[in-house]
Amino acid sequence: MSKVNKAILIGQLVINLPVLILILVMPTLIVHLSNSVIYFFLSLVFGIISAWLYWAMSTPRWKLWAFKYVGVENSFYLNEQAKLRYLTWSNRGFLEFRNKRLTEELKKFEKESAEYEQIEKIKIDLSTGDSLSYKFNKKSIYVEFIVRCFLLFVGSYMLSLDTWVLGCILLLIALFYGNHFKVLRPVVKNEIGLTINERWIYISYPSKRIIDWNDAKAYSINTETMELTIEYFHDGMLESIDIKLAVFDIRDINMFAKQLNIMLERRQYKDGNQYPFSDN
């Protein structure tokens, strides 16, 4: 387990879990002890206020510990993951209870983190070419294909033994498990599956298409599910596509996201205008 994931797990145990207990357990206990609606309402209000007070006092202390634990090189990723897990709501921390020492130390870490990210951004920019191309993730796709064939074989065998329920379940899982069989063709041919440059993005799976960034309205990358979502205009109609990045041989999804942003910033700089779309 990485340091960031460990810090997030500890944050969920010492912050989110007690908050949920205060909000849910207390009113439930009151209802169990008394059927009074008034007591339930008062306990619910008290639970919410208590949960917020606990969150406001514990979050900045956890954040300071977590920053020190993961180091400045991982602080940006830690902050993003903390927001996704609802451990923090804002960089400014206006909902948090901080004393002077906590405020100064957190500001120091946030400043160091911002400086580190800027330096890293320059390094990544210098090391990123004019185009990013990715082939398919052969290992993952082949393993998935073997598992699917195994399920089909076992499911068919179960049907031959008149074990209809289990056989049908295994066959259904095999049919809907993972990616479509047609992904094997470009994998076997060792084709490029994804190409990104300053002007457009090319995807060969699940269907071949080229999306010009001029037609794009918005895009977002979910690092957890490894999906790139793009909203774009096609023939005057707004469409959306979810690209499963796990299908492609992308070793570091966070680096991929940074390189994509750099590509689009270069395009913005060359065109001398603002982004034609927003990064959600």
Image: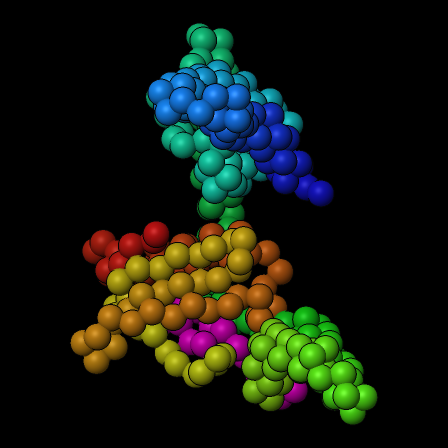
Quarter of the image for residue 11 reads top right
Residue sitting at x 40%, y 63%:
229
Quarter of the image for residue 94 reads top left
Q: Nearer the viewer, residue 256 or 174?
A: 174
Q: Position of residue 212 (x, y in %)?
A: 31, 73
Q: Is residue 244 left or right of residue 218?
A: right
Q: Is residue 28 left or right of residue 187?
A: left
Q: Position of residue 236 (x, y in %)?
A: 18, 76
Quarter of the image for residue 39 reads top left
Specify whether residue 14 is in view.
yes
Q: Position of residue 262 (x, y in %)?
A: 41, 54
- 230 over 202 or under it: above or below: above
Residue sitting at x 21%, y 56%:
273
Q: Position of residue 223 (x, y in %)?
A: 52, 53
Instruction: Assess whether residue 41 is covered by the magenta stretch.
Output: no
Q: Nearer the viewer, residue 202 or 198?
A: 202
- 172 over 118 or under it: above or below: below
**How many numbered tags mark residues here?**
0
Q: Nearer the viewer, residue 45 or 215?
A: 45
Instruction: Assess whether residue 188 is covered by the magenta stretch.
Output: yes
Residue that extends furthest to the bottom in the rendered view of this protein: 160
Magenta stretch: give its range. 186-203
Q: Is residue 138 left or right of residue 106?
A: right
Residue sitting at x 44%, y 25%:
35
- 186 over 68 or under it: above or below: below
Residue that extends furthest to the left in the rendered view of this protein: 236
Residue sitting at x 57%, y 70%:
248
Q: Is residue 161 left or right of residue 19?
A: right
Specify whether residue 63 is in view.
no
